[in-house]
Amino acid sequence: SGLNRQRVAAAWNAVSGAAGYTLDVYLDKGILYVTLGSSLARNQLYFQRDVLVRKVNEFLENDSLFVKGNGPAVRNIVLK
């Protein structure tokens, strides 16, 4: 839903520290696709993907507006 899309984007911006470089955030079937405007930021975040997955999921678990399904919301992150 649209609200979940906004909540996922808010979670990414809160935990990644790359809100200024983020162009688009899209969650599809447990994969979080993130388009970044900086190759330097993308390279730095690439090595932190496992930590970011855990932190985004923790953020969404504590978010009362996010509609939760079965299991973790984000299983992997793809940086573009």
Image (spheres, rainbow, N blue to C red):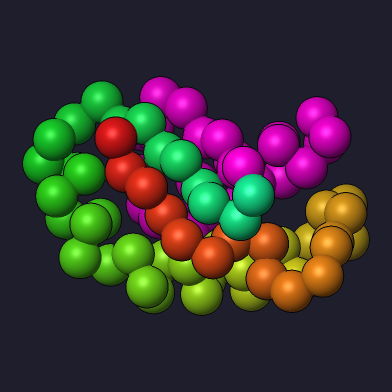
- Residue 34: give x, y in percent of width and height: 42, 38
- Placement of 48 over or under 13, stated as above or below: below
Q: Percent from the top left, x then y, of residue 12? A: 52, 50
The image shows residue 52 at horizontal and vertical percentages of 42, 66
Q: Residue at x 20, y 65 (%)?
A: 47
- Res 18 → quadrant: top left
Q: How many marks?
A: 0
Segment colored magenta: 1-28
Q: Is residue 45 left or right of residue 50?
A: left
Left or right placement of residue 53 versus residue 41 in this view = right
**Observer able to see residue 68:** yes
Residue situated furthest front in the rendering = 29
Residue 58 higher or lower than 29, as above or below: below
- Percent of width and height locating residue 11: 60, 53
Q: Is residue 21 magenta?
A: yes
Q: Tell me which residue sits at (71%, 37%) in the image.
A: 5
Instruction: Give the residue displayed 32% in from the left and 43% down from the top.
Output: 79
Q: Nearer the viewer, residue 27 or 20?
A: 27
